[in-house]
Image (cartoon, helix red, strand yellow):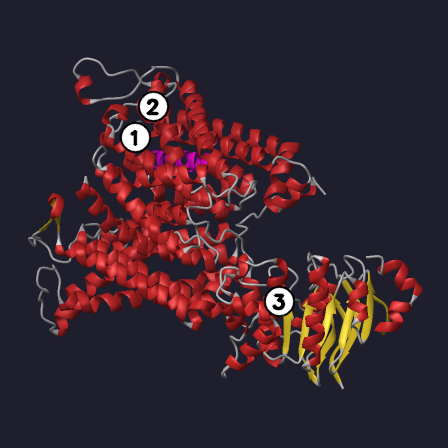
Amino acid sequence: MEVGGIIAYLVSLVIMASIYGVFCLGLNIQWGYTGLFNIGIAGFFCIGAYTSAMITTSMPTGVLAQYVHQLFGLNMPFIFGLIGAAISCGLVAFLIGVPTLRLSEDYLAIATLGIAETFRLIFNNERWLANGPQGLMGLPQPLHSLVSGQKYDYIYLVIVLVVMVIIYFLIEKGIRSPWGRVLRAIREDELAASASGKDVFRFKMQSLIFGSMVMGVGGALYAHYTKAISPDVFTPLYGTFIIWVMLMAGGSGNNKGALLGAYVIWFIWIGSDFLMDMLPAAIQDKGPYLRFLIVGILLEIILIYRPQGILGEEKKVSKLYK
Amino acid sequence: MAELIVYGIVLGSVISLGAIGITLVYGIVRMANFAHGEFMTAGAYIALLVVGVILPWLGVPDTTFGPLSFGWRMLIAFPVSMAAVAFMGIFFDRLLYKKLRLKNSNAVILAMSSLGVSFIIRMIILIITGPDYRFYRPGVMRPAIMLPLDIKIRPDQIFIVALVVVLVVLLHLFLQRTKMGKAMRATADNTELALVSGIDTEAIVMWTWGIGGGLAAAAGMLYGIDVQLHPGMGWNFLIPLFAAAILGGIGNMYGALVGGLVIGIAEQLSTAVLLPTYKLAVAFIIMILILFIKPEGIFGGSEK
Amino acid sequence: MTILKADGISAGYTELDILQKVSIQVKSNQIVSIIGPNGAGKSTLLKTIFGILKPREGHITLKDEDITGLKPNKIARKGISYVPQVSNVFPSLTIQENLEMGAFIRTDDFRGRMKEMYDLFPTLREKRNQKAGQLSGGQRQMVAMGRALMLDPMLLLLDEPSAGLAPLLVSTIFEKIADINKTGVSIAIVEQNAKEALKMADHGYVLAMGRNVLDDDGKSLLDNEDVAKLYLGG
């Protein structure tokens, strides 16, 4: 493979890792800073992706309408896709939050899991919504007209990195504000935080919503990168579990850790693909399962031996409040 | 519609077995076990191994008991698989959860660990058997019996309900009449006082995993007998299991029993208007409704 | 003969020690009362003796055996029983089952002992199949003590047994405690109700801010003006 090909491949890796980085940032708001256990990330991934897809495409017409069904198509620019994705995810987060946030963390976990599975079922079975199992294709890519097809990835890389960095700084600012300090206090000791007069429920809800909005943006970024989405993309493994491993590996409670974890685990993931090529042909088809088995074992090792991840929680933030 | 209710009872009894395990673990070990569905899958597949590979190799004949779809092989596989998954539950507890408990890890970390375990179990099963659907007895004709009210029911399904009743009665007697059973209830009530009374709470934890795992395995096998086996079968049960446990009052075994039946019947009734694949979503909606209306469940349960 | 000796105990729940070099003694058949203001560390002392907390320094001796740092289930086997202040019964278990759990580590036939418990607390006998969580405060306290006594301990640790009880029940409970003591059980009792606790005490300890302040026999402490001023108001 010549250099150009290698670079192109690396660019695609960094794009995917950065998209997962956005997800990790969102999860970090919920788990790292507030202690919320969201195992339905795949659901927000799915909703964000589909919302953006339908906002940015137009309703199929003519012959195509017989084969492709979608609920709406607004044909608006990319940026509105991102915004729409964020809003729809925020809304869903609010709806789950109402019954579950006052109860123990496990209930939120089960509820988020249920949302993810339910939405996947709905998108898979209701053709009128978003074309069912075949999904939506031909999703537009922003600024596509600027360069020829092969070089487009460079533009998208810049777009993804810009979005990621903007989100990073927004979160960093939020965490260092009084709002962020209350979140940390809730994670440390909820009873004490509520005893000091803070409306714990409101803060948790805000954290849930903002984190989910970020995840929605991640879903949108993904959709416009791959240009085609279908329900089987948003599985518990690729859409939820791997993001948890990334955040735990990098360091929860630390935005740099969230991003680091995304890159490290994604590169390990891709690397394991090459490792699997070395397996004897007879068990080659077990490759994907072996890779996920390794990821699962990796998570357990992290939880027992280094739950704070590579970077650990940010020291700076904890110094901000006595 | 009466038929749907009957099928609902069949499905519901399977859900109950799993939900009882979830609720026991939650009440005594104080964690949400997200690997419980995979315990069911493992139970079903271990039985498949026994019935399809080990017993034929040992020369055990492949008979069937009357109108049932299975015979000696499955009968032997039952306790074997239940014991195996019981040990599997204890194994993961010793290997992982106990270490996390000793570090005073909070409930979320424990639950996260169980999520990891669920993927580990599922991947191992996928590596060994691959993703295809399987049956204990492929291609068999399963003749139905006619009951009053035009209800068709298969003999297998009557066996399923009967076995669940037997297992639940046995569990009830164990919890109410034996020293260890009472100690389990005491530990669920008040772990600190159990320690103060000299009860070996770690042994109680082992028993809990053993019973929970064994019941899950039974549920998996029964489902496999009734419908089919596939590596994702347990994961699809996870929401209904938790919904049933929460509906009945988390920590309350009898609540889980009732909750399971309610969820099962609701799921089957829903197939009159929805695609069967949505059963999981029906369980989920019920769970959300209960959390809105009466979060401690029908029977209150042992909320911490 | 000294049954229990706690010597120079420093202990706490976090890095901050609540107890600072506290010492008490319980002799055979004695009732020892430990009084003092809230936060003095009285409950912490009992928990440390019973092994729920590990002392940072100091020794605890039972008869002649060093039991410092042993876990509760070992200490229970050595002849000490502990009744916590709150959450001291198994609510969904019946009275009978609560007593059975009290006898969990016994390997012999404890039915005789259970009969003695019902003789000591007759009200419980008729309600024996009722769930402990449905009982009144006073009855629950009796179940809690009965559970602890099933082990035939030589020393009983009671943490604020009269807490939250109506005045009539308070005297009943203290009567029962005296009865228990008459059967040969030594008792160490932590109490907010200093007056009642000192009335029945053979010896009393006053703790404040995690330290020993005063100790004397029960009657002298009752008559002591400072003690009366500071602690016997309520």
Q: Position of residue C51 (x, y in %)?
A: 64, 71
Nearest the viewer among B81 and A276 is B81
Q: Chain of mark 2?
A: A
Q: Quadrant of residue A219?
A: top left
In the rendered view, tell whether residue A215 sits above or below residue C205: above
> How far apart are the two marked residues, 1 and 2, measured between alpha carbons?
8 Å
Amino acid type assigned to the residue bearing label 2 in the image = Ala
Q: Circle 1 — which element?
A: loop
Element on which disc 2 rests:
helix
Tell me the number on the disc at residue B47. none
For label 2, the residue is: A53
Would you call the spot at circle 2 few (<14 residues within 10 Å), some (14-19), or many (20 or more)? many
Query: Hey, what amino acid is under mark 3?
Result: Met
Q: Nearer the viewer, mark 3 or mark 1?
A: 3
Provide the chain ID for the residue under circle 1: A
Question: In this view of the protein, which residue sits in the foreground, A210 or A228?
Answer: A210
The residue that mark 1 highlights is A229
As helix, strand or loop, the secondary structure at mark 3 comes to helix
- Residue at the (48%, 65%) spot, across then down: C129
> Where in the figure is residue A259, as x and y percent of width and height?
50, 39
Q: Are marks 3 and 1 in contact (CB under 8 Å)?
A: no
Q: Relative to B108, is B54 above or below?
A: below
Tag 1–tag 2 contact (CB < 8 Å): yes
Q: Which residue is mark 3?
A: C142
Question: Where, quadrant-wise, is the C terminus of chain C in this rendering?
Answer: bottom right
Check residue C35 for magenta coloring.
no
Q: Is residue A15 magenta?
A: yes
